[in-house]
Amino acid sequence: MIEIKNLDFSYKRTQVFSDISLTFEEGNIYGLLGENGVGKTTLLKLICGLQRPTSGSCTVDGVTSHLRLPSMLQRITFLPDEMSLPAGTTPQRYVDELRPFYPNFAQATFLHLMQEFEVEHDRKFKEMSFGQQKKSLIAAALSLGTDYVLLDEPTNGLDIPGKAQFRSILSKRVDERSTIIISTHQVKDVENLIDPIVILSNNAVLLDATVQRITEKLYFEYGGEKRDDALYSELMPGGYLNVAPNTTGEESQINIEGLFNAVLRNKNLVKELFNK
Amino acid sequence: MEFRKQKPIYLQIADRLMERVLAGELKEEDRVPSVRDVAEAMGVNPNTVMRTFEFLQSNEIINNRRGVGYFVSPDAKQKILAEQRREFLENDLPLIKQKMKILGIDPMELMS
C-alpha cells in the first residue's frame, strides 16, 4: 500500500501540495487526473522517491519513499512521460541493463509484450518511431515484475491499435498484489480501465473515489435536454450530456471528461456530495 | 424514442454475456470465461468484470464453483428471458407506444 499523509511539497517558491493525504491499495488501476501543472508527475516522483516531501510522509508498504532503499526500489517502476533513450541500444539490451535491479523481471513476459505491440526487441531505438519506442518502454516497465507500476501519460504517442493493446495488457497485468497508477490527460484512452479515479487540483485532492461510488453520487445522462440541476452539461451530437447529482440511486455509465469538468466547476458541492 | 440512459459498464458486460447465453454460444453448465480473460478481451478493469460476475451470480444466471470458476446455471436461459420480457414490457414498450402515437402508426398496421 502507498500511504501519503499530510504531505506538503514545494518547488522553491511554488507550492504544489498542501497537506494532502491519499492511499493507493493493491489490486487496483488508479487513474490520476488533473489540469496541467497540478502536480501529477510530482506525485509520482514523490511515491518513487525522486522527490522528497517538504513535510508529511510518503511510504510504500511502510517504507519512507525518499530513503530510496533498494528493497523498496526493486518493487516499484516509474515510466516517465519524457523518454531519454540511449539511441544506439535495443529494447533487449535496455532490459538487460535493468534486470540486475529487478529480481522478478520476466524475459518471457517482455518478449510476449513486445510481440503483442509488434515491435522487434532487437531493433535499435534510433531506428524506431516515437510510438514504437514508447511501446518498448511500456513492455519493459510491465515485465520488471514490480508490485508498483507508475505510468506517466503512457498512451502519448501510441497509435490506434496500440491504445487498445495497452488497455488489454494492463487489465491482464493487474493482480491482487499489484498497484498501478496511470497519470493522464488522455482519459478516452483509459476510460474503462481506471478505477478508482483521483483528481488533483489547487494543491489538494479534489476527488478520490471508485467508479461505483462516483456513479452512486452522480448521474450521467446522455442525449436529453439540458438539465437545470446539472453540475455540468455539454452539447453532443445526440443531445446533451448532463452530469447531475444522482437522486434515484440508479447507476449510469461514467463519462470521465464530463466527471472532470463537473468536479472542477463545483469543487465545494462535489466535496460535500462525496463526504456524505 | 429517446435513450437518455446508458447502463454502467458492468451491466453492459452482463448484457453481452447474457446475449451469448441466449444465442447458445454459452450453454447451460458451460464454464464462463474467467474475470481476467473477459477483462483482457474487452480492455476493461478486472474489478468491473468482477462486479458483472457478482451481479450475474446474485441473479442466479451463473454460479461459482470454488477454486474452479464460474459456470452458467442450469436454468439461466429461462431466467434471462423472464427478466428481459419484464424489462421490455416495463421500459421499452411504453416508449414504443408513445412513439407510435406521435408518428400516427396504428398497431394493426404492424400486424400485416
Image: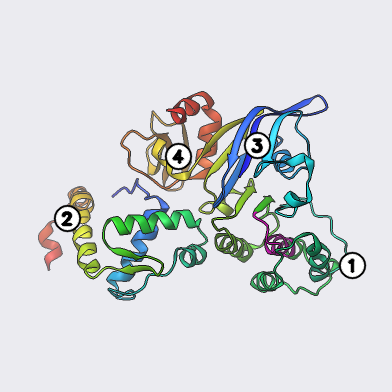
- Disc 4 crowd rating (10 Å Cα; few below 14, some 14-19, many 20+) is many
Describe residue B30's horizontal placement relative to residue A134 as left or right. left
Q: CA distance from mark 1 to mark 2?
A: 71 Å
Vertical side of B33 occupied by A147: above or below: above
What segment carries the magenta color?
Answer: A135-147
The three-letter code of the residue at mark 4 reads Ile
Chain ID at mark 2: B
Magenta: predominant secondary structure element?
Answer: helix
Q: CA distance from mark 3 to mark 4?
A: 20 Å
Residue pointed to by mark 2: B105
Residue pointed to by mark 3: A35
Residue pointed to by mark 4: A214
As drawn, the residue found furthest toward the left would be B108
Vertical side of A218 occupied by B8: above or below: below
Taking depth in this image into account, of B51 and A6 the one nearest to the observer is A6
Q: Quadrant of residue A67?
A: top right
Whether the magenta-drawn stretch holds residue B109 is answered as no
Identify the colour scheme used: rainbow
- Disc 1 crowd rating (10 Å Cα; few below 14, some 14-19, many 20+) is few
Residue under the image location 58 percent in, 37 percent down: A199
Mark nearer the viewer, 2 or 3: 3
Mark 2 falls on what kind of element?
Answer: loop
Mark 3 falls on what kind of element?
Answer: loop
The three-letter code of the residue at mark 3 reads Glu
Describe residue A55's horizontal placement relative to residue A248 as left or right. right
Mark 1 falls on what kind of element?
Answer: loop
Q: Quadrant of residue A212?
A: top left
Vertical side of B29 occupied by A48: above or below: above
Q: Is residue A80 visible?
A: no
Say whether marks 2 and 3 touch (CB < 8 Å): no
Q: Which of the labelled discs sits on residue A88, or is there none?
A: 1
